[in-house]
């Protein structure tokens, strides 16, 4: 599977809440943007904890619009992001950009941009 297909599959698995499948695509010392509190979480265990906290409070859905490799080697994913509260009320409906550094077939870093 190439990097673009891997990222698309990771979004599918995230939206299905199959987080262990997504975590398996990450480097053990991954740096992952914390979209709720800012900064980054570090390592697969912290990403898991971050997502579990997120899912306990919100229901996010991120659908890739496009996936491209930038000149700097990072992958840029434009996503349509919706976030609902646990009762189904829409809190956010926007487009964001996620930037990935991938090495050796594993995600090493994810950043959020606009």
Image: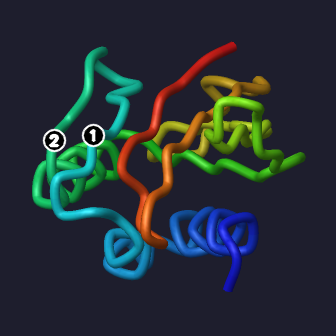
Q: Is residue 55 left or right of 73 when viewed as pictured?
A: left
How far across and how far down the image is residue 45, in percent?
11, 59
- Is the C-beta separation of discs 2 and 1 under 8 Å? yes
Disc 1 designates what residue? 31
Give how far apart the Cα atoms at labels 2 and 1 are. Answer: 5 Å
Name which of mark 2 and mark 1 comes first in the sequence: 1
Q: Quadrant of residue 9?
A: bottom right
* Picture mark count: 2
* Viewer-closest of 42 and 50: 42
User: Badge 2, how many Cα within 10 Å: few under 14, some, many 20+?
Assistant: some
Residue at 70% x, 76% y is 2
Find residue 13 and report its horizontal and vertical position in percent: 55, 75
Q: Is residue 18 above or below residue 88?
A: below
Q: SS class of the residue under badge 1?
A: strand
Farthest residue, direction right: 65
Marking on residue 101: none
In terms of image quadrants, where is residue 70? Answer: top right
* Residue 16 pos. (x, y %): 55, 74
Quadrant of the image containing the N terminus: bottom right
**Residue marked by disc 2:** 42
Q: Residues within 10 Å of mark 1 (few under 14, many from 20)?
A: many
Residue at 28% over, 63% down: 27
Residue at 61 percent of width and 34 percent of height: 98
Q: Nearer the viewer, residue 11 or 27?
A: 27
Badge 2 element: strand
């Amino acid at each position: 599977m190439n990097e673009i297909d891997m990222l698309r599959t990771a979004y599918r698995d995230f939206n299905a809440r199959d987080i262990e499948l997504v975590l398996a695509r990450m480097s053990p010392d991954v740096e992952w943007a914390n979209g709720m509190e800012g900064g980054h979480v570090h390592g697969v265990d912290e990403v898991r904890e971050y997502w579990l906290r997120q899912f306990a409070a919100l229901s996010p859905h991120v659908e890739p619009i496009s996936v491209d490799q930038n000149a700097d080697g990072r992958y840029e994913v434009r996503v349509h992001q919706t976030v609902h509260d646990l009762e189904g009320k829409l809190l956010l409906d926007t487009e964001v950009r996620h930037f990935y550094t991938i090495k050796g077939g594993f995600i090493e870093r994810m950043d959020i941009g606009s």
